[in-house]
């Protein structure tokens, strides 16, 4: 990595931390703000949360092409300005229509930030440093979310609209500060769609769908996000309250345990997975999450003491955090290594789109199931976790040696990106 790439990477990491801080500042209190503080009711509050997902699904396909054509930095700056306007107007909105429009702008801006920042990390890293760069990104995101949520919780007062207006104004300010920080980034030259042959410009999505390994990774990614992230604040929390009798304070402790596990374990885990096959690491995560769901099953169905049920439920979130820490230096770099030259933005946007789909479907399925059908809920997501292991091992057969074992690039100095995969010999 050159000195210029290192300087750019440091600013990108600052950007990740600030954007996560802004999200943590307001997102946990969005439902209360719309439903109670503005007095618009639970239905409107639910629509606001749905608008976030719908806005992301609409803009992400176009974001990928824009990143490829214009580069990630201009797209990121535009997304930050849009998110700042959305946050500020959301703090001032009083009616249902203005709240929904503001939420759409904020959701669209936030959704585009993810693939733009990921593509900037790809452009400013090498095969040797990419896993560590994405691990740092995930660490800073969780740290920013935790700190933002903690500070935001001390600022809000449900009896005063002005406290929420201040909250959203600070979030908008964070995005604008981030515009200033990111505008100073000097990105290294990377191929753009304009540099590539005309055939690639017309067939970017067709080329992506023709990449068997990428399609398999997207299916695997959907299951990952559906079985874990899509359940955190919907099905799993409903299951904990209804089946295990978990109090709201214990639920907060479980969420804190998840974040703490990520922050504490991230770089220790990185050392363990850096020289392991990526697909084997993902397969291991599926097994760890299966154990997490068994712990959740004991919490709600084990008929033990309330203390034991609470401990098991908190351990479920902690085990999920351990799996997340293992995925951060594995999955995102793999998306980058599967992308042909100049199409990293489109591949990152496609994977972000898969994530948003899973996060939209997950609560819709898991919420009612976790609240009423307790045993089927646990069994269903236990099977989904085991399917992560199966899908990861199948994906390993479609990857080249360097894509699955990136440390071999240091020896061969050959980085395989997006081409036809070579068969990998099975390991004992």
Image (cartoon, rainbow, N blue to C red):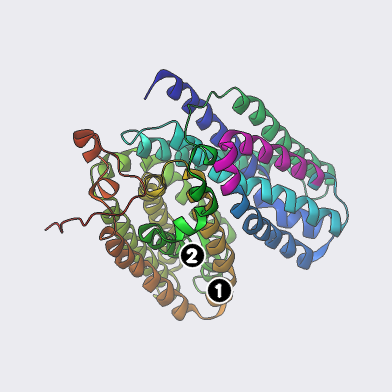
**Residue in the picture at 75% in, 41% down:** 168
Q: Quadrant of residue 77?
A: top right
In depth, the one of 324 and 425 nearer the eye is 425
Residue located beneath label 2 in the image: 226
Give the percent coordinates (x, y) of residue 423: 21, 57
**Residue in the picture at 51% in, 56% down:** 205
Q: What number is the disc on residue 365? A: 1
Q: What number is the disc on residue 9? A: none
Crowd around label 2: few <14 · some 14–19 · many ≥20 (10 Å): many
Does 409 appear above or below 404?
above
Q: Residue furthest front?
A: 198
Callout 1 secondary element: helix
Give the percent coordinates (x, y) of residue 160: 83, 46
**Residue in the picture at 58% in, 41% down:** 69
Give the percent coordinates (x, y) of residue 178: 64, 30
**Is the Cβ of the residue at disc 2 closer than 8 Å to that at disc 1?**
yes
The answer, for residue 320, to whether it is visible in the render is yes
Relative to 141, is 220 on the left or the right?
Answer: left
Q: Quadrant of residue 84?
A: top right
Callout 2 secondary element: helix
Segment tinted magenta in the rendering: 64-89
In depth, the one of 90 and 278 nearer the eye is 278
């Amino acid at each position: 990595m050159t000195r210029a790439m290192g300087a750019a990477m440091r600013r990108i990491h600052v950007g990740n931390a600030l954007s996560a801080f802004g999200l943590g500042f307001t997102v946990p209190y969005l439902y209360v703000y719309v439903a109670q503080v503005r007095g618009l009711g639970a239905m409107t509050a639910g629509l606001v949360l749905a608008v976030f997902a719908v806005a992301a699904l609409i803009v992400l396909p176009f974001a990928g092409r824009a990143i490829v054509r214009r580069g990630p930095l201009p797209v990121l700056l535009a997304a930050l300005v849009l998110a700042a306007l959305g946050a500020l107007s959301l703090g001032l909105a009083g009616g249902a229509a203005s709240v929904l429009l503001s939420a759409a702008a904020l959701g669209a801006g936030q959704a585009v930030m993810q693939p733009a920042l990921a593509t900037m990390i790809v452009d400013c890293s090498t095969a040797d440093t990419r896993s560590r760069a994405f691990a740092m990104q995930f660490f800073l995101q969780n740290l920013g979310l935790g700190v933002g949520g903690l500070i935001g919780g001390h600022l809000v007062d449900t009896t005063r609209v002005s406290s929420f207006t201040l909250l959203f104004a600070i979030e908008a300010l964070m995005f604008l500060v981030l515009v200033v920080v990111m505008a100073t980034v000097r990105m290294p030259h990377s191929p753009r769609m304009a540099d590539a042959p005309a055939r690639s410009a017309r067939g970017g999505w067709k080329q992506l769908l023709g990449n068997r390994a990428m399609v398999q990774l997207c299916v695997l990614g959907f299951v990952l996000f559906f079985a874990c992230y899509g359940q955190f604040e919907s099905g799993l929390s409903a299951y904990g309250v209804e089946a295990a009798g978990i109090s709201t304070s214990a639920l907060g402790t479980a969420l804190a345990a998840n974040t703490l596990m990520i922050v504490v374990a991230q770089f220790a885990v990185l050392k363990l997975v850096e020289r392991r096959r990526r697909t084997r690491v993902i397969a291991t995560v599926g097994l760890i999450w299966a154990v997490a769901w068994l712990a959740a099953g004991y919490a709600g169905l084990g008929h033990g003491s309330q203390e034991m049920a609470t401990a098991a439920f908190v351990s479920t979130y902690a085990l999920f955090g351990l799996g997340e820490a293992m995925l951060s230096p594995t999955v995102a770099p793999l998306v980058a290594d599967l992308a042909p030259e100049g199409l990293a933005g489109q591949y990152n946007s496609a994977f972000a789109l898969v994530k948003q789909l899973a996060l939209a479907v997950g609560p819709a399925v898991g919420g009612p199931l976790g609240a009423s059908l307790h045993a089927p809920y646990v069994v269903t997501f236990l099977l989904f976790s085991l399917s992560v292991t199966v899908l990861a091992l199948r994906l390993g057969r479609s990857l080249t040696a360097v894509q699955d074992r990136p440390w071999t690039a240091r020896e061969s100095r050959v980085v395989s990106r997006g081409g036809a995969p070579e068969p990998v010999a099975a390991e004992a």
